[in-house]
Amino acid sequence: MPQAETGELLPKMVQEIQRIEEDCTYSCKGHFNAAEDWKSWNLVLGLPAAVVTALAGATAFADQAFWAGILATIGTVLTATLTFLKPSDHASTHKSYGDQFLGLRNAARIFREIELVSTTEQDMQALKKRLLELSVKKDELNQTAPVIPRKAYELARKDIEEGRHRHAVDQ
């Protein structure tokens, strides 16, 4: 590869890997926020369902059929909602994708900070290949990941703009 081409390509590679890092930062933060929201829904629905169902059973033994029926109905509605929405599954899925985007962001940062810094002309083809692999991985994650809810994304954007995603060493 001619020297002029290498000199022109390296800054473009740096820009592209920075784009990947930025996309991954927003995606991982958004997924982590969505996971927290779903985890909260699991508690909001699950804990009352368990308590109300237990109270319904206790009330039935106390010969309070009316209240036992009301509590059993409430418990059934909460449990059915919990079963239908599956908040723990959603929380798990978003957490998993958050972890994957975070891992990709870390790999991209290492690529930019370490691999690209020590570039020689002989390395350029391997580095281009590595950059394309990271880009493909990001695209694959984007295609398979669930949509980040708007609220979770907005919170992620706010946190990122306020610098809450940076390591102390990077500040």
Image (cartoon, grey):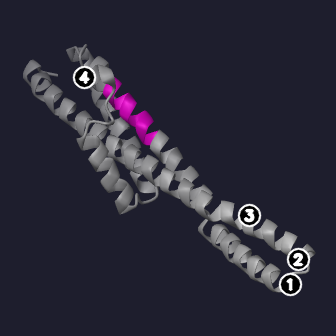
Circles 2 and 3: CB atoms closer than 8 Å: no
Q: Amino acid at mark 2?
A: Ala
Q: Where are the magenta residues, as a range?
A: 100-110
**Marks 4/3: CA–CA distance:** 62 Å
Q: Which residue is mark 2?
A: 60
The disc placed on residue 51 is: 3
Q: In terms of sequence position, does the residue under pointer 2 or pointer 3 come before the other?
A: 3
Question: Which structural element holds mark 1?
Answer: helix
Q: Is residue 61 left or right of residue 97?
A: right
**Marks 4/1: CA–CA distance:** 78 Å
Q: Give me the residue at 38% from left, 55% from top.
A: 152
The disc placed on residue 49 is: none
Q: Give me the residue at 66% from left, 62% from top.
A: 46
Question: Which structural element holds mark 3?
Answer: helix
The disc placed on residue 65 is: 1
**Marks 1/3: CA–CA distance:** 17 Å
**Marks 4/2: CA–CA distance:** 75 Å
